[in-house]
Amino acid sequence: MKSEDNYYLAALARCRGLGSRNIQKLLGKFPSAAAIWQAPREALYLVGGLSSQQVQNLLRFRKENQLLPEQLAEQCQRLGISLCSITQGNYPNILKEIFDPPVVFYYRGQLQPEAVRVAMVGARRFTPYGESTALEFGKQLAAAGLTVVSGAARGIDTASHKGALKTGRTVAVLGCGVDVAYPAENKRLLQEIPERGGVVLSEYGPGTIPLPIFFPARNRIISGLSQGTLVVEAARHSGSLITAELSLSEGRDVFAIPGSIYSTTSQGCNHLIQQGAKLVQEPVDVLVEYGLAAPPKAKMKRQFTPEERQIWQVLSFEHPLTIDEIFDSLPDGEMSNLAFLLLQMELKGLVIENELHAYRRAERE
């Protein structure tokens, strides 16, 4: 398929009620997507496979959007967005295998079709345990050569991407256009992913705003791109479990990190383990499934001032502390420049500040 034909295919994908499976049937009957876009009414009826209503919808959509293929081509070129169609060689084969693969997707960054990918998903409202686990697993899995796939949502998704970016590649699958930053606080993250060898992709065209209906459909791409899905932290009825269920339905691996039986944010993971998901306690539990070894752990070279060492000793990896809690835990009970010292330690990579402005150690002992 010629590259310009991709934009006719992208235009067809925007026709409501047509669907990717019907578009693929049409591609088997017509020589190109452009030929489908330009086919007369009689030809569309004669090929079979489409209902009368679907033919009418397509004819009406074409009439109202005659210049859409050309407009999409211009828009993508202007915004630096690439388009990949299911007929192209760089379309990931693993994504073709799912029940309803997107016929096209838009992307920014570098596609690596044959990369070994694992999805990491979880709650938007996470605990410090979930955040630190997602950061650590994202970092270790990417360092071992896996590409971490997630949805760039608040919470576990964001932590997974950030962890992976420290050592390797990550893929963000959006429920909006790839030129739209959602959530807004992830604007820099979504710029950084393609800059550092990863990919931001979506089946929705440029400028598409996020709508609730788009996210369940987005989840099938997250699981579809991945050999397995790791659920880090999720409530019993979390949307993250949809991704795990999709992964199961496609015969892919499902992993889950256990949590406290008293934590509502771990009930979903614990339930998945009951249902047969592989219990994961450390990154190597995932890596062995794909014949990969854990990377050698680099020892952080820590250089502390005496005051920084006092702060370090009251912090932990799992439980972030606010400035007031740190102050109260210091042996002297006074350190007037505590906020400045924490900033310096963050710049050195010794501590991490979370969204609630609480601090923890950057690595486990």
Image: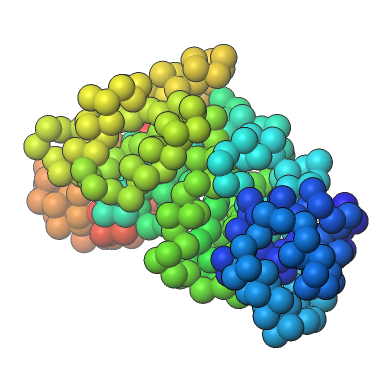
Q: Eyeballing the image, is 38 above or below 230?
A: below
Q: Eyeballing the image, is 331 above or below 106?
A: above
Residue drawn at x 50%, y 33% as measured from the top left = 250
Q: Is 111 displayed left or right of 268 in the figure?
A: right
Could one spot residue 316 in this view of the protein?
Answer: no
Numbered disc total: 0
Query: Which residue of the protein is positioned furthest toward the bottom in this rendering?
Result: 64
Locate residue 103, reporting x and y percent: 68, 53
Q: Eyeballing the image, is 191 above or below 158?
A: below
Residue drawn at x 42%, y 49% as measured from the top left = 157
Residue drawn at x 15%, y 44% as measured from the top left = 264
279 or 61: nearer the eye? 61
73 or 320: nearer the eye? 73
Locate residue 185, reporting x and y percent: 44, 67
- The quarter of the picture where residue 248 lies is top left
Locate residue 339, reporting x and y percent: 28, 60
Q: Eyeballing the image, is 228 above or below 348?
A: above
Q: Is 128 displayed left or right of 144 in the figure?
A: left
